[in-house]
Amino acid sequence: MADKQPEALTLADILEFKIPSIECLEKAAAELRRLHEVNADLIDALQFCSGTSYITDAHRVAEETLAKV
């Protein structure tokens, strides 16, 4: 995922500071959808972690993160 962050930031800069092309808008929409899917997967993983007590610290971090959602 780290290699995708610069793409998201580049698109955000274009949308904020320039007149975006249709291609840029389409790329931004696709990236937002991809990031939404990743976010949903991370939330699912955190919910799973919060339901288990195998590692106390992971459980605590998962619950704190889920409280922010």
Image: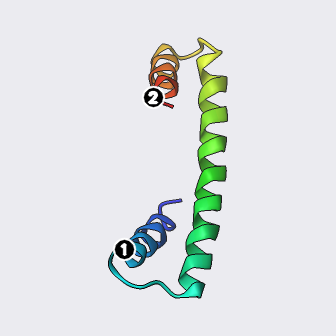
Q: Residue at x 59, y 14 (%)?
A: 54
Task: Tell me where residue 14 appears, x and y as whole percent.
Answer: 40, 79
**Quarter location, residue 27:** bottom right
What is the number of the mark on residue 25? none
| Other residues around mark 1 within 10 Å, as few (<14) / some (14–19) / many (≥20) | few
Q: Residue at x 64, y 69 (%)?
A: 30
Task: Tell me where residue 24 appears, x and y as whole percent.
Answer: 54, 82
The numbered mark, 2 or 1, whose residue comes first in the sequence reads: 1
**Which part of the image, by quadrant, shows the N terminus?**
bottom right
Nearest the eye: 25 or 46? 25
Task: Tell me where residue 44 appears, x and y as whole percent.
Answer: 67, 33
Task: Tell me where residue 21 appears, x and y as whole percent.
Answer: 52, 88
Q: Is residue 12 left or right of residue 31?
A: left
Residue that badge 2 annotates: 68
Q: Is residue 18 left or right of residue 3?
A: left
| Other residues around mark 2 within 10 Å, as few (<14) / some (14–19) / many (≥20) | few
Q: Secondary structure at mark 1?
A: helix
Q: Secondary structure at mark 2?
A: helix
Q: Amino acid at mark 2?
A: Lys
Q: Residue at x 36, y 72 (%)?
A: 16
Residue that badge 1 annotates: 13
Number of labels in the image equals 2
Vertical position of residue 7 compared to residue 67: above or below: below
Vertical position of residue 19 compared to residue 28: above or below: below
Vertical position of residue 3 compared to residue 27: above or below: above
Q: Residue furthest front?
A: 19
Quote the CA–CA distance across marks 2 and 1: 26 Å
Q: Is residue 1 left or right of residue 52?
A: left
